[in-house]
Amino acid sequence: MVTIAKRSRPDARTQALSLAGKIDERLDAAMLLGELAGTAKVLLDLARISTVTSSGIQAFCRLVEGLVRGGASEIVLLRVASPIAFQVAICPGIFDPARVESAQLPFVCGTCGEERDHVVPYVAGADRSHPPACACGATMELDGMAAQYLPT
């Protein structure tokens, strides 16, 4: 079940929510739409989403549609967790008109084996142009194929 982990209002026309948990059929779009009513710009931080089901994808699409109907002119998805980045990569435009700005993806060090998530811009090649440095000094690599998570 999705919960609101953090709320903020960066400016008068913008509201930001950080969501956490599992996106599934229990996604309470009405509650989230109530939180965001009348907001022109919506920022959704999805870094703490652990899993997403197919019915959760449908519910999230309904949330985006509801935000647009409610007057949101800009919806930005930030630090999209890898389960959601995977869905967007295999079905580009699934959350239109929402724009994915960044993704939090799994990286691994080929030298020492350290694993960690790292935020990269949501653009083709970001895994190579924005890799994290490992504590051992090596450059980490995306744990998986870029096409699984990023646009091509």
Image (cartoon, rainbow, N blue to C red):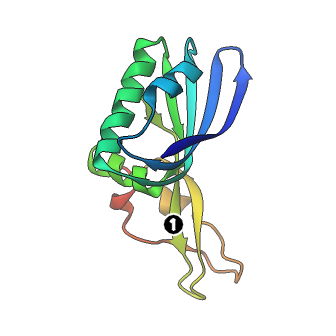
Foreground: 56 or 108?
Answer: 56
* Residue 16 as seen in the image, left or right of residue 59: right
Indicate the quadrant where residue 129 lies: bottom right
Vertical placement of residue 113 versus 140, above or below: below
Indicate the quadrant where residue 10 lies: top right
Residue 73 image point, x, y percent: 48, 16
Instruction: Name the residue at the bottom extreme.
Output: 112
Foreground: 131 or 4?
Answer: 4
Q: How many marks?
A: 1
Vertical placement of residue 22 versus 71, above or below: below
Q: Which residue is painted at 35% across and 35% down in the image?
A: 59
Which residue is tagged 1? 106
Q: Label 1 amino acid?
A: Pro
Residue 135 image point, x, y percent: 71, 78
Q: Label 1, secondary structure: give it.
A: strand
Vertical placement of residue 136 versus 49, above or below: below
Q: Which residue is painted at 36% across and 67% down in the image?
A: 145
Q: Residues within 10 Å of mark 1 (few under 14, many from 20)?
A: some
* Residue 85 as seen in the image, left or right of residue 113: left
- From this viewpoint, is residue 124 visible? no
Indicate the quadrant where residue 36 lies: top right
Residue 63 image point, x, y percent: 41, 28
Foreground: 121 or 98?
Answer: 98
Residue 18 image point, x, y percent: 61, 40
Q: Which residue is painted at 70% across and 80% down in the image?
A: 137
- From this viewpoint, is residue 137 visible? yes
Q: Which residue is painted at 45% across and 57% down in the image?
A: 82
* Residue 34 as seen in the image, left or right of residue 133: left
